[in-house]
Image: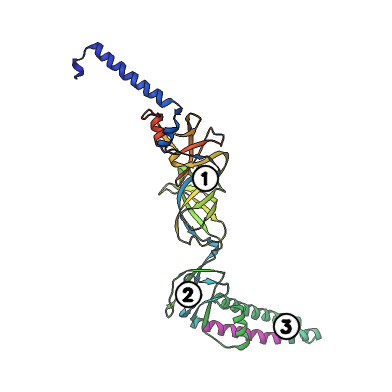
């Protein structure tokens, strides 16, 4: 039928009919209850579930990187140039403070030891002169000026010996090794590289048999008793994150949690994110330094909130709704979705907490509610 051939009264009737149908659908969509018989309840495969109260709300998801605190990560470098003769540790080894990680032969170390022993010898001779002149001064056999010259020279020798001892310490010799050198006067070009802390070897940058320069890196060592998560949070979401918020690491064998301890004060101009840091609680083995992980930030709440399955929530016209069981069917209640965790959502609404919701069959109930199906 061509609308152009219709008379004016006929067009008016069609428009009136269309308006009536539209009004009817709107009335059905605005109804907040669904009448449903027991038979249709069973036929639609509807299952009920209870609201589960929660005290924590998921805020957002973000990527993160696992790192060791800078104060607990060390680069073990050669304190002298030389030839690496032995490496005693491999990546992943647990190390105790003071363990010998590597050995190298260093000609420069021999020269430093020789100069130290000469300084010690000069100090010992000076000490004899010092003690002699001190006694002569007490007996009045020498002038005060001579005693002052002797004491000044003795102090200079003592300073020189201390300087060379400190140079050996900087070169990597331990106090025990220096004392042994002082006692035996036996020079050795072998330099032991010691671990400065308890930790784990996380990288090796040298090989046995290779020549290295002074300060060339050999190992990276880290104490993993505490780990950090470095996060990049979109700048438009940073106001929703607070210090002390809980951080949950996803897809780990154990439940690994952390706590937000730092929120950056600047925005990265490249990706418009804000740097944040979370500290993992307690030592654990579910994550590793350098690992990229996905995390979820969770906040505590004092407001009433409940966990329900995602399938229990119906969407309509930008709003979220659930179906609450009543004596004659279901009541449609609007809810606010506060966050999602996998197959579940955290919601709030006008609940007492004892309601039963449709957790299966919500699609059929939505169709009935919007007038797309029948409850009978």
Mark 1 sits on what residue? 241
C-alpha span from label 1 to label 3: 75 Å
Q: Nearer the viewer, residue 56 or 142?
A: 56
| Residue at x-position 70% and y-position 81% | 149
Residue 319 appears in the picture as rendered: no
Residue at 38% across, 29% down? 374
| Residue placed under numbered mark 2 in the picture | 214
Q: Quadrant of residue 125?
A: bottom right
- Sequence order check, earlier mark of 2 and 1: 2
Residue 211 in the image: state x and y as whole percent: 43, 79
Query: SS for tag 3?
Result: helix
| Marks 2, 3: nearer the viewer | 2
**Disc 2 on helix, strand or loop?**
loop
Q: Residue under circle 3?
A: 146
Foreground residue among 99 and 272: 99
Question: Label 2 vs label 3: CA separation?
Answer: 45 Å
Label 2 close to label 3 by CB (< 8 Å): no
């Amino acid at each position: 039928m061509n609308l152009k051939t219709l008379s004016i009264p006929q067009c008016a009737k069609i428009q009136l009919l269309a308006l009536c149908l539209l009004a009817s659908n709107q009335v059905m969509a605005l109804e907040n209850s669904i009448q449903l018989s027991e038979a249709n309840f069973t036929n639609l495969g509807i299952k009920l579930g209870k609201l589960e109260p929660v005290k924590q709300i998921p805020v957002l998801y973000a990527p993160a990187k696992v790192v060791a605190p800078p104060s607990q990560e060390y680069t073990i470098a050669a304190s002298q140039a030389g030839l690496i003769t032995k490496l005693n540790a491999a990546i992943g080894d647990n190390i105790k403070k003071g363990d010998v990680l590597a050995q190298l032969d260093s000609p420069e170390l021999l020269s430093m030891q020789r100069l130290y022993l000469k300084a010690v010898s000069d100090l010992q001779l000076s000490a004899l002169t010092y003690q002699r002149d001190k006694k002569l001064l007490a007996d009045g056999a020498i002038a005060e000026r001579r005693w002052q010259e002797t004491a000044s020279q003795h102090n200079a020798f003592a300073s020189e010996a201390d300087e060379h001892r400190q140079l050996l310490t900087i070169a990597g010799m331990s106090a025990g090794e220096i004392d042994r050198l002082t006692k035996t006067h036996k020079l050795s070009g072998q330099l032991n590289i010691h671990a400065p802390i308890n930790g784990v070897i996380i990288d090796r940058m040298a090989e046995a048999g290779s020549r290295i320069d002074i300060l060339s890196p050999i190992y990276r060592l880290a104490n993993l008793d505490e780990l950090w998560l470095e996060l990049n949070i979109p700048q438009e979401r940073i106001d929703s994150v607070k210090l002390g918020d809980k951080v949950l690491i996803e897809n780990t064998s154990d439940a690994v949690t952390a706590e937000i301890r730092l929120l950056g004060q600047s925005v990265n101009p490249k990706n418009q994110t804000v740097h944040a840091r979370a500290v993992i609680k307690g030592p654990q083995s579910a994550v590793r330094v350098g690992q990229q992980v996905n995390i979820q930030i969770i906040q505590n709440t004092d407001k009433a909130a409940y966990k329900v399955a995602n399938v229990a929530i119906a969407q309509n016209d930008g709003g979220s709704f659930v179906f609450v069981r009543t004596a004659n069917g279901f009541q449609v209640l609007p809810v606010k979705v506060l966050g999602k965790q996998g197959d579940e959502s955290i919601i709030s609404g006008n609940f007492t907490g004892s309601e039963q919701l449709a957790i299966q069959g919500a699609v059929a109930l939505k169709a009935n509610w919007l007038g797309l199906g029948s409850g009978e």
